[in-house]
Image (cartoon, helix red, strand yellow):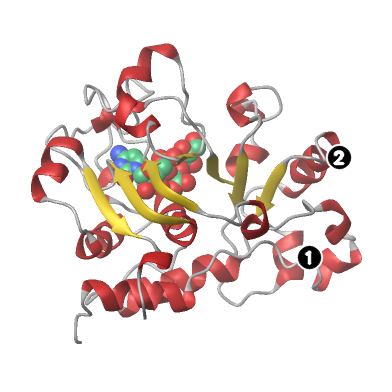
Amino acid sequence: YQPLSKHDLLCELKSRAWFKTLPSKEGPFKALNYSQLEPKNTLYQLHHDGFNTCAAVMNSAAILGSNLGEEIDSHDAVMRFNSAPLSEKYRADIGVKTTLRLMNSQLLANPSYNFFTDPIYRNITMIVWDPAAYTGDMQEWYENPDANFFSSYEKRRRMFPQEHLYITDPRFYWELWDVLQENTEAMIHPNPPSSGFQGIAVMLSLCKKLDVYEFLPSERITMKCHYYEKWNLNPACTLGWWHDLRAEKYFILRMNTGTKEDITKKGKVTLDGYSAVDC
Ligand code: NCC
């Protein structure tokens, strides 16, 4: 096992881990005419010029008290995750600007997230992923997704045909998982990477520079899980269990171009995007 350098790790991602949307011309999706249903432009057609500066803001409770809202909002594009709320009371710490939101399929499948009515899911680019088997059998996945979200996607596409809502091709996050495992000394859980790690990879493909907030925990690290929940105490949220967050976080740390102080004070790592590196 030979650890790769910062540059080589980034090149490994750049050569293999580009975001892909649902394979609408394959298997069940072809029969269901999904190419008519999906957004007309791909993610890369939509954001064809890319962004200079980007932020990805994790849902970690450690961001509370950070006062990073203004800094986060000053980026050209901001990615947020799952049901992360934008209420006034969090604004000073997390900001409000949202360009993209990456969500797991529970957000569409479970009505308690109010996907169809909550304004945090309007007028932004959205990406949804569902844990599929590594084998990549699309028929089996469509018939038996981890969370039952395909019908919500279909309904939503008909409701807002102009909206940019993409389903992730499972081969994207499995390729990402392969890169993570190949560059981790220990064996990691054979589960898809967390939404946070997937989002970082998406942003690396769209941005020249990416600041990631509270993925590597700051000195405000806490047992509390999310910035928007009071009583959810679970260190696994930060350290991982189903997702191998420790492996993901160590991998990202190895690519950091920022300072140690930015991590301890701000929970911030700075990464070069794919367009900033020659491989
Ligand atoms: O918690 P979650 O993630 O929504 O957080 C988004 C990403 O932020 C990073 N994170 C979060 C909390 C924390 N203390 N430290 C962190 O580093 C992680 O990278 C995480 O991916 C997910 O990945 O989709 C996840 O989603 C939740 C949950 O489904 C959604 O919040 C919707 O309620 C999962 N929790 C449960 O299923 C109970 C979580 O395991 C992973």
Q: Is residue 135 visible?
A: yes
As measured in the structure, the alpha-carbon distance from the residue carrying label 2 to the one carrying label 1 is 16 Å
What residue is pinned by disc 1? Answer: 24
So how many labels did they put on this image? 2
Give whichever of discs 2 and 1 has the lower sequence position: 1
Q: Are marks 2 and 1 in contact (CB under 8 Å)?
A: no
Quadrant occupied by the C terminus: bottom left
Q: Secondary structure at mark 2?
A: helix
Q: Position of residue 225 (x, y in %)?
A: 31, 33
Question: Given the current orientation, which residue lies at the most extreme left position?
Answer: 261
Q: Position of residue 40 (x, y in %)?
A: 79, 54
Q: Position of residue 224 (x, y in %)?
A: 26, 30
Amino acid at pointer 2: Arg
Q: Is residue 116 left or right of residue 61?
A: right
Is 227 placed above or below 133 here?
Answer: above
What residue is pinned by disc 2? Answer: 158
Q: Residue at x 66, y 54 (%)?
A: 167
Q: Nearer the viewer, residue 11 or 59?
A: 11
Amino acid at pointer 1: Ser
Q: Residue at x 27, y 28 (%)?
A: 68
Q: Is residue 158 left or right of residue 195?
A: right
Q: Position of residue 139 (x, y in %)?
A: 77, 69
